Amino acid sequence: MRASIRRRHSGGSGFKAMIVKLSIAAVVLLICTLSLFFSSTGTSNVQSNYRSEIRLEELWSKADSGGWRPSSAPRTHWPPPPSESNGYLRVRCNGGLNQQRSAISNAVLAARIMNATLVLPELDANSFWHDDSGFHGIYDVEHFIKTLRYDVKIVESIPENQKNSKKKKIKAFQLRPPRDAPISWYVTDALKKMKEHGAIYLTPFSHRLAEEIDNPEYQRLRCRVNYHALRFKPNIMQLSQLIVDKLRAQGPFMSIHLRFEMDMLAFAGCFDIFTPGEQKILKKYREENFAPKRLVYNERRAIGKCPLTPEEVGLILRALGFDNSTRIYLAAGELFGGERFMKPFRNLFPRLENHSSVEHSEELAENTRGLAGSAVDYMVCLLSDIFMPTYDGPSNFANNLLGHRLYYGFRTTIRPDRKSLAPIFIDRENGRTAGFEEAVRKVMLTTNFGEPHKRVSPESFYTNSWPECFCRTSAQNPADKCPPNDILNIMNNELEKTEADANFTIS
C-alpha cells in the first residue's frame, strides 16, 4: 500500500516537473519569437536585392526607402562637451578629398572619445594634389564649428599658454596611430600622452580609427560630421549647383566616376590591354608607389579585379536599356590610354559632359583646381539622378558618394558586380556574343540600386551607414525609432546650461 502511494506521489511530482519544464520552454520560445519579430520588423526590414526586372523609369527615380529616412541626431542622452577638456588634438589628414573627409569624421569622434579640444584638421594636399588651399580653402569653417558645437569643442589653432605672466605655445606630442586603431588605444595611449603634454599630433591620420564600433551614437556622430558639418565653401556649392541646373535643364542626367586612370590601373595590375610603352609607364608607377606583388592580368581580370574599361561601362548601360540620348556627366581625372579607349564609349553615348564642357567661365577655371575640382565633381555626382562608380574597391571618391547618396534620400546608384560580369565580357571578347545583354541584366538584377541594405564586410561604414544613421517613424524596434522633433532644442538647452555652470564656477 505504502509503496503504491509512494509511486503515485512520485508520478505526481514527475508530472509537475514536466509541466514546469514545458512552461519554461514555452517562455523561452516566446522570448525568441518576440526577439525575432522585433529583429525582422526592425533593422532586418530592408529591400530584397533581387528584382524580377529592371525598369528605366524606376532607375530615374529614387530607390524605395522602405519607410526609412536619414537621421544622425542622438537618440539617447548625449551631453555637450564639458567646459574643460583633457587637451588639444591635432591631426594631419592625408590622401585625396574623400579619404580626408573620412579622416576628419574620425578625428571629431576621437576628440569626443578623449574629451579633447579638436584643432581644425590639417589637409595634406601637397603630396596628393599639389594644392595648399587647406581646410579653409575647401570647407565652410564657421558652419563646421557651429554644426558640431553639441559634440566637440573646435579651435582653429592651439592657443598660447599663459604662465607666470609669460605666454608659451603648447607643443603637441607627435604620435603615429595604428591603422584602424580601436577606441581603447585612444582612451589609453593617446589620452595618456595628451594629459602629459597638453596636446598631441596624430599623423598620418587616414584609416586610423576602427570603422565598426559597437556604439550607434558614435557612428551617428560620424554621419553628422560627414553629411552635415563638412559643407564646401559657398563658391564651390554655387558652381556645382550651376552645373547641375544646366545639365538638368535638358532632363534627368546620370553621373559616372570613370576610374580608368594611371594610379588605379597600376594598383590593380591590369596592364595587358595597353601598348608596350604604356605598360612600361604603368609598371614604373606601380614599382614607385605600391608594394611588390605577383600580378597576372588574366587571373586579375577573371575575378573582377580590373577597373571596367569605358566600353564595358557603355555595354552595361546599353544592356540595362539606356540609349544614346542619355545625358552623362563624367567625373574623372586624365583617362589612361586617351581617346583610343573613350571612342567606343562615346559612340554608344555621345552626350558626354564634364565640368569644363558644361560651364566655360573664368570662375570655373579658378574654382576647379586641385581639391576644389574634386569637390565640384563630388557635388554634381551627389545631386545627379543616377550615379555609377566603375571601380568602387579602394576608391574613396566612389565609396563616400555611395554612402552620401544613400543618406541623401536613397538616390539611385548602379553598382556593377565586376566579378560576376568578368566571364561575360571575356566570352564576348572571344566571340561568344549570344545572350550577352541578357547575361549582363541577370547579373545586375542581383545588385543593389540604392535601397537600404545590410552592411556586409568589406563594405565600409562610409559607404553604407544603415541602420545606425537612419530611423523609422513607425518602427517596432525602439532602436530604430526617430528622435523627437525638438532634439536640437534639447541639446541647445543642455549646452547653454553647461556654459552657464562653467561661467558661474569661474566667477
Image (cartoon, helix red, strand yellow):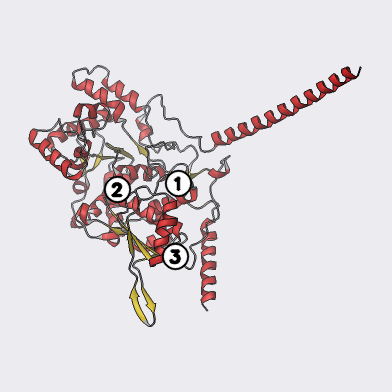
- Tell me if mark 3 has few (under 14), some (14-19) or many (20+) residues whose alpha carbon lies within 10 angstroms of its own: some
Which amino acid type corresponds to the residue marked 3 in the rendered image?
Asn
* Front residue of this view, candidates 354 and 440: 440
For mark 3, what is the residue? 86
Q: Residue furthest front?
A: 3
Q: Is residue 303 above or below residue 199?
A: above
Element at label 2: helix
Give x and y (percent) for residue 498. 53, 67
Of the numbered discs 2 and 1, the one sitting upstream in the chain is 1
User: Visible in this render: residue 129?
Assistant: yes
* Front residue of this view, candidates 314 and 18: 18
Which amino acid type corresponds to the residue marked 1 in the rendered image?
Ile
* Front residue of this view, candidates 114 and 141: 114
Element at label 3: loop
Give x and y (percent) for residue 245. 29, 48
Total residue callouts: 3
For mark 1, what is the residue? 213
Q: Is residue 317 above or below residue 163?
A: above
Q: Residue furthest right?
A: 1
Q: Is residue 470 left or right of residue 230?
A: right
Give x and y (percent) for residue 126. 21, 56
Between the C-alphas of marks 2 and 1, the distance is: 27 Å
User: Visible in this render: residue 364?
Assistant: no
Q: Is residue 379 above or below residue 92?
A: above
The label nearer to you, 2 versus 1, is 1
For mark 2, what is the residue? 378
Give x and y (percent) for residue 163. 39, 79
